[in-house]
Image (tube, rainbow, N blue to C red):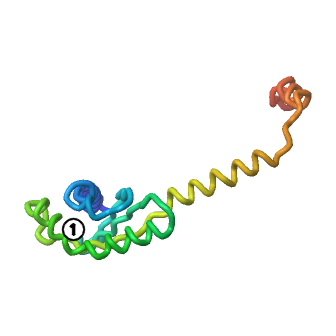
Amino acid sequence: MSIRTERVGRLIQQEVADLLQGEFHEGSHSLTTVTGARVTPDLSTAYVNVSVLGDDAQREAAFKWLEALTPQLRRALASRVRHQFKRVPELKFFLDDTPQHAARMDELFAKIASERPATSEDEEDGEEEDGGRGDY
C-alpha cells in the first residue's frame, strides 16, 4: 500500500467511527467499533471493518442496519472530507470477528491450563540448578 492509500484509510476509519458515535448512534442498539479501513489503490472503494459487541443475533442485526445506512454514511462522510477528495470512496462494510476469536482462544488456553498437571517443586528446582548451560 502506498502512503496515500494508508492515510486515506486512516482518515476514513476515523471519520466513519466519529459518524457512528455521533450522528448515527441512535439507530444502533449495540456497541459498534470501527477496527480498520483500507482503500483500493485507485481510491474508489473503502473496505471498513467493524466489530459489534453482543451475541450473534445482535451482531447480525447491527450489521444489517449498518449496510442499510451505507448511503447516508457516505453522504455524511462526503460533507466532512469534501476538500480532501475529488470523489468519496464507495463504502463496503465487513464484520470483524477478532474479539470473538480472542475470547475463544482465551477459553482454550484456560482449558489447557486447567487440564495440565501442576509441576512439582522438585522438577522446578532441578531446572534452576542446571541453569540451561550445556556441557562444552
Residue furthest top as drawn:
129
Residue at image position (14%, 72%) is 87
Residue kind at label 1, given as amino acid type: Leu
Q: How many marks?
A: 1
Given residues 92 and 128, the one toward you in this image is 92
- Measured from the top left, where is residue 109 in percent x and y? 69, 50
Residue at 30 percent of width and 71 percent of height: 40
Quadrant in which the N terminus is drawn:
bottom left
How packed mark 1 is, by other alpha carbons closer than 10 Å (few <14, some 14-19, many 20 or more), is many
Q: Is residue 69 left or right of residue 133?
A: left
Q: In the rendered image, which residue does mark 1 sit on? A: 73
- Please identify the residue farthest to the left as the structure is shown: 83
Tell whether 21 sits left or right of 51: left
Looking at the picture, how far across and down is residue 64, in whole percent? 36, 74
User: Percent position (x, y) of residue 55?
Assistant: 50, 63
Q: Position of residue 24 (x, y in %)?
A: 23, 62
With 88 as the anchor, is 16 left or right in this view?
Answer: right
Q: Is residue 115 above or below residue 86?
A: above
Report whether residue 35 is seen: no
